[in-house]
Image (spheres, rainbow, N blue to C red):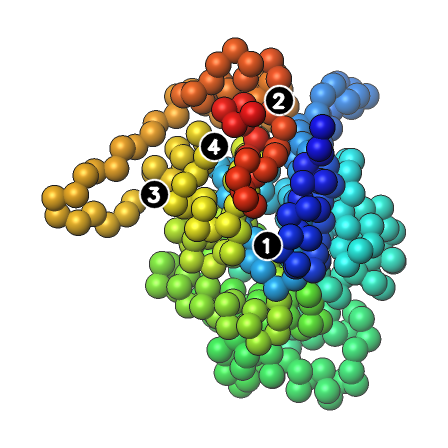
Amino acid sequence: MTSPNEILEKNSQENNSETLLELQDVKKHFPIKSGLLQKTVGHIKAVDGINLKVNKGETLGIVGESGCGKSTVGRTIIRLYEPTDGKIIFNGRDISHLSESELRKDVRKNIQMIFQDPFASLNPRKTLRSIIREPLDTHHLYKSKERDEKVEILLEKVGLNASFINRYPHEFSGGQRQRIGISRALALNPELIVADEAVSALDVSIQAQIINLMEDLQEEFGLTYIFISHDLSVVRHISDRVGVMYLGKMMELASKKEIYAEPLHPYTQALLSAVPVPRKKGSMKRERIILKGELPSPANPPKGCVFHTRCPAAFDLCKQVNPDFKEVKNNHFVACHLYT
C-alpha cells in the first residue's frame, strides 16, 4: 500500500514545486500524570500522525475546531514542543531532534512565529526598539547602529511610524501590536512563518488590514506561511491550500478552490455549512449540517476513524479501521472510508 508520505512526494514532484517543510508521521502526545509519585497514566494525543508537505512561497491554511491540534502542530514545527515521534524536515534536514544550540545556530533564523495574542507575546517592560532588536542581538547580526536602522525599516515595512521606536506595547492598539509581532518575526529574514490565529483577536476591519499586509510581505520577501485559524473565511482569503484537522489528525487537504467548491470529507462539509454566505433573493437556502454529540477527548480518541462518533455518513467499517490519508482526486487528499 502506498504510504501518505509517498503520495505527497509524488504530488510535489508533479507540481514541480520545491519542498520547504515536510512532516512525516509527526506526533505530539502530552503525558497525563497522577498520584503522589506523578506516574504517567495516559497521554493526550494532541497531534497523532500528521503527514504534510509545504512548498516554498505558498500559504498553507490549517483549520479545525478548538482542540483539534492545529496550534500544537505549529508549535511542534518550530520546536517549541518536542515531537513525540515522526520527522520534521526543513530544507532537506531533519530538525526533529536537534539540540537547542543547533536549532539556534542553523534553524531559528529561518523559522519564525506570529502568536495569537499580540499583547501577551510582547514584553511589556521593553520598548519597540528592544523587542524588535532582540532577535538581531541574540544572533549577533549587524553592528549596534545598523540594528537600530534595521528596526526602523521593519517598523515602516509593517505600517508603523519609526518615531514609535521608544514606545511600549501598552501604548498601541491590538492591530498595531500585531504589526509589531510581524516586524519581530521578519527581523531575521526567515523563510517560513507560522501564524497561529494571527488575526482572531482583532476586529474584522483590522483583520483585513493585517491579512493584506501579510500578503504584501509574502510577495516582497518570498515568504512561506503556515496560517492556522478556526475562521474559514479568513483562511479562504489568504491560503493556496487548506488542510482540515480533527482530533489530532488531518482529515482533508486540497487546494483552496477544491476545498470550498467540493469538500469531500463529512467533517469539512459540516464546517463549511456553518460559514455565513450572502444569498441572492430567490436563491435556495444552503442546508446547515449539525454535528451531533461532543468532541471526544484526545486522551481517549475513538477506535477506527476518530470522527465516526459524530459523522452522519458513518458505517461499520468506520468504527473499526482508521482510514488512510490518500489521494482520491488530483491533488485532493482525504482520510475517509467513503472514498476507498
Q: Earlier in the sequence, mark 3 or mark 4?
A: 4
Whichever of labels 2 and 1 marks the residue nearer the N terminus, that label is 1
- Mark 3: amino acid: Val
Give the spatial CA distance, label 2 vs label 1.
26 Å
Q: Mark 4 belongs to which amino acid?
A: His
- Mark 2: amino acid: Asn
Q: Nearer the viewer, mark 2 or mark 1?
A: 2
The residue at which mark 1 appears reads as 226
Nearer to us of marks 1 and 4 is 4
Q: Are marks 2 and 1 in contact (CB under 8 Å)?
A: no
Residue 160's place in the image compared with 334, above or below, is: below
- SS label for mark 4: loop
Real-space CA distance between mark 3 and mark 4, rounded to the nearest whole angstrom: 16 Å
Closer to us: 272 or 106? 272
Q: Quadrant of the N terminus?
A: top right
Mark 2–mark 3 Cα distance, whole angstroms, equals: 28 Å
Residue 245, quarter of picture: top right
N-term-proximal mark, 1 vs 4: 1
Residue 185 x, y percent position in the rendering: 64, 66
Q: Which label's residue is closer to the chain start, 2 or 3? A: 3
Residue that numbered label 4 is attached to? 265
Decide: marks 2, 4 in contact (CB < 8 A)? no
Neighbour tally class for label 1: few under 14, some 14-19, many 20 plus, Cα within 10 Å: many
**Measured along the vertical axis of the image, is residue 264 above or below residue 206?**
above
For the residues marked 2 and 4, what is the alpha-carbon distance in whole angstroms? Answer: 14 Å
Relative image position of residue 331 (x, y in whole percent): 56, 45
Q: Identify residue for label 3.
A: 275
